[in-house]
Amino acid sequence: MRLSEDRISHISHLVLDALVRNRNVDALLPEEKLLREIKRTITAELQFEDEADAAARRTIQSLSRRVPEGSREWEVLYQKYREEELRRRRKL
């Protein structure tokens, strides 16, 4: 995860404020519950991205020939495998 708990909390508060300001939130739900759900969603999405990153890196490392990280070929393969992993995981 690339964001600290404080950063996630801050972003969650900004999202909640925007939702309340635009009246997109059911007033019957307590703000604490909404805030918890926003934080949970952000954290889950970041973990999902991290897992796709790790899977793409493992796939590149498992190739029969070595592809140097940072090379143009590595970048292309990384994007390809990461997108495939994201698509696969979103279907589950």
Image (cartoon, helix red, strand yellow):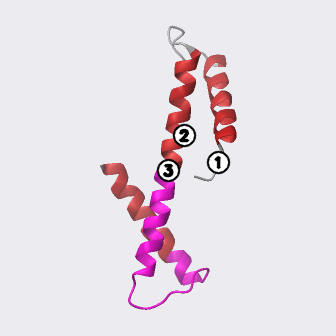
Residue 80 vertical position relative to residue 23 in the rendered view, above or below: below
Residue that carries the numbered disc 1 in the rendered image: 3
49 is within the stretch colored magenta:
yes
For the residues labelled 1 and 2, say whether their Cβ atoms are less than 8 Å apart.
yes
Which residue is located at x 53 percent, y 80 percent?
Answer: 74
**CA distance for labels 3 and 2:** 9 Å
Disc 1 crowd rating (10 Å Cα; few below 14, some 14-19, many 20+) is: few
The alpha-carbon separation of the residues under discs 3 and 1 comes to: 10 Å
In the displayed structure, does residue 87 sit left or right of residue 6? left
What amino acid does circle 1 point to? Leu
Determine if residue 65 is in view.
Answer: yes
**Which residue does the image show at 64% across and 40% down from the upper left?**
5
- Separation of residues labelled 1 and 2 (CA atoms): 10 Å
Amino acid, disc 2: Ile
**Nearer the camera: disc 1 or disc 2:** 1
Q: Secondary structure at mark 3?
A: helix
Image side of residue 7 versus residue 62, left or right: right
**Which quadrant of the view contains residue 69?**
bottom right
Instruction: Give the magenta range.
Output: 47-76
Residue contact at pointers 3 and 2, CB within 8 angstroms: no
Tag count: 3
Element at label 1 = loop
Q: Is 48 inside the magenta-drawn segment?
A: yes
Q: At 65% across and 34% down in the image, what residue appears?
A: 9
Q: What residue did someone put label 3 on?
A: 47
The reply to whether residue 24 is in sight is no
What numbered label is drawn on residue 42? 2
